[in-house]
Image: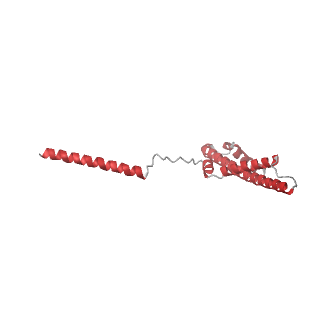
């Protein structure tokens, strides 16, 4: 069993180049990098989900315990800790479930869309009007030159 697990463990720990010959090392390294980043994202997602559920359930239990007691309601230190754990794990969960995070882990960088390359409809209309005016002026000049040369 250990003979099967040792190559797999070495694959994820970075010494996978011993398993493959020279031409496949670059491909193997890229594969290992992508698998590591995917493994990290999946582990973070599952861990954040578990911590979110635990923090929320403990917070609800503490609040319910406060309502059941005869004392007045107050936020105890443990409630603040459970609330902080829930909020932080929700943030990590939201980050790990974003499309950009998964694309970055797979090696597909999204390029920012350049707004300067696209012009608005108003800019296009003004540019067409200006070009039409310039062409009309050029044609008038050409007609005047033709009339002057003819006379």
Q: Position of residue 106 (x, y in %)?
A: 61, 49
Asked whether 90 or 48 is in front, the reply is: 90
Identify the residue at the far right of this view: 70
The image shows residue 53, relative to residue 149, as above or below, that is below
In the image, what residue occupies the spot 23% across and 48% down? 140
Q: Is residue 30 left or right of residue 75?
A: left
Q: Is residue 121 left or right of residue 85?
A: left
Q: Position of residue 100 (x, y in %)?
A: 60, 50
In the image, what residue occupies the spot 70% across and 46% down? 12
Q: Is residue 54 left or right of residue 104?
A: right
Residue 98, can we see it? yes
Asked whether 119 or 33 is in front, the reply is: 119
In the image, what residue occupies the spot 14% across and 44% down? 149
Identify the residue at the far front of this view: 72
Q: Position of residue 133 (x, y in %)?
A: 30, 48
Residue 39, can we see it? no
Question: The C terminus lies in which quarter of the figure?
Answer: top left
| Corner quadrant of residue 13 | top right
Q: Position of residue 99 (x, y in %)?
A: 61, 52
The image shows residue 24, relative to residue 57, as above or below, that is above
The image shows residue 18, relative to residue 120, as above or below, that is above
């Amino acid at each position: 069993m250990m003979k099967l697990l040792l190559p797999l463990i070495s694959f994820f720990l970075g010494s996978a180049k011993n398993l493959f010959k020279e031409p496949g090392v670059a491909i193997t390294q890229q594969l290992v990098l992508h698998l590591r980043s995917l493994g990290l994202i999946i582990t973070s997602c599952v861990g954040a989900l578990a911590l979110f559920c635990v923090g929320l359930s403990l917070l609800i239990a503490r609040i319910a315990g406060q309502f059941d007691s005869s004392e007045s309601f107050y936020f105890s230190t443990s409630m603040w800790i459970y609330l902080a754990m829930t909020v932080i794990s929700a943030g990590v969960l939201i980050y790990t479930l974003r499309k950009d995070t998964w694309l970055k882990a797979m090696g597909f960088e999204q390029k920012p869309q350049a707004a300067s390359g696209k012009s608005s409809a108003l800019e296009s209309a003004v540019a067409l009007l200006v070009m039409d005016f310039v062409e009309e002026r050029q044609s008038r000049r050409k007609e005047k030159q033709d009339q002057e040369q003819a006379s």
